[in-house]
C-alpha cells in the first residue's frame, strides 16, 4: 500500500492510528512530483525504499532507515547527503545514468572503502570524480 494513502486516509483521526502508521519501518515511497513536506517529515524515518524521480530538492537526511535509494536526478546537495554515517543500513544505491554529475569525494570514499557496511549494489551512473581538488 502506498504510504500516501495511509497518511491522507488515517492521519490525525486518533493517536492510535497515528502510532500504527509510524510503527511500520519498511515503507516504500516513490516521489514523482512535488510532495507534501509534512508527509515527508512524518514518514521519512519509516521509509525503507526511496525512489525520487523529480527535480524537487528532497532532503535525504530525514530518511535514516533507508535500505534502498534510487535517484533519477540527483542534485549536488543530495549527493553530499548520501553518507555512511547518515544511511547506515543502505544495501542498494542507484543513481540514474541519464545525468552526468560530479560525485563528492566523501560519497566515493564511503562506497569504495566499505563504510556502507551493508551495501551490496551501487550503480553510480555517469559519475565524474575531480581528482585534482
Image (spheres, rainbow, N blue to C red):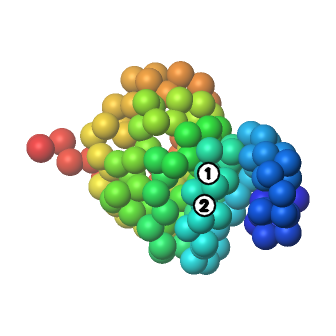
For mark 1, does the 10 Å Cα neighbourhood hold few (<14), some (14 to 19), or many (20 or more) residues? many
Measuring from the top left, give residue 36's x and y in whole percent. Answer: 60, 72
* Location of mark 2 (residue): 40
- Residue 79 in the image: x percent, y percent? 39, 52
Question: For this rendering, which residue is in front, 131 or 38?
Answer: 38
Q: Nearer the viewer, residue 45 or 73?
A: 45
User: Mark 2 falls on what kind of element?
Assistant: helix
Cβ atoms under marks 2 and 1 closer than 8 Å: yes
Quadrant occupied by the C terminus = top left
Q: Is residue 92 visible?
A: no
Residue 127 locus on image (x, y percent): 37, 52
Q: Which residue matches tag 1?
A: 44
In the figure, 51 relative to 115: above or below? below
Q: Secondary structure at mark 1?
A: helix
Task: Identify the mark at residue 73; answer none if there is no mark.
Answer: none
Residue 57 appearing in the image: yes
The residue depicted at 85 percent of the width and 69 percent of the height is 9
Q: CA distance from mark 2 to mark 1?
A: 5 Å
Name the residue located 69 percent from the left edge and 63 percent from the top edge: 30
The image position of residue 91, as x and y in percent, is 62, 34
Amino acid at each position: 500500500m502506498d504510504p500516501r494513502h495511509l497518511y491522507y486516509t488515517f492521519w490525525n483521526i486518533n493517536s492510535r492510528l497515528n502510532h500504527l502508521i509510524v510503527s511500520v519501518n519498511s515503507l516504500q515511497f516513490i516521489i514523482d512530483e512535488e510532495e507534501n513536506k509534512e508527509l515527508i517529515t512524518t514518514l521519512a524515518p519509516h521509509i525503507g525504499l526511496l525512489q525520487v524521480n523529480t527535480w524537487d530538492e528532497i532532503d535525504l537526511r530525514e530518511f535514516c532507515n533507508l535500505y534502498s535509494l534510487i535517484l533519477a536526478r540527483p542534485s549536488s546537495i543530495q549527493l553530499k547527503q548520501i553518507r555512511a554515517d547518515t544511511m547506515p543500513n543502505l544495501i542498494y544505491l542507484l543513481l540514474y545514468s541519464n545525468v552526468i554529475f560530479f560525485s563528492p569525494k566523501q560519497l566515493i570514499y564511503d562506497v569504495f572503502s566499505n563504510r556502507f557496511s551493508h551495501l551490496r549494489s551501487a550503480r553510480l551512473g555517469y559519475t565524474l570524480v575531480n581528482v585534482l581538488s
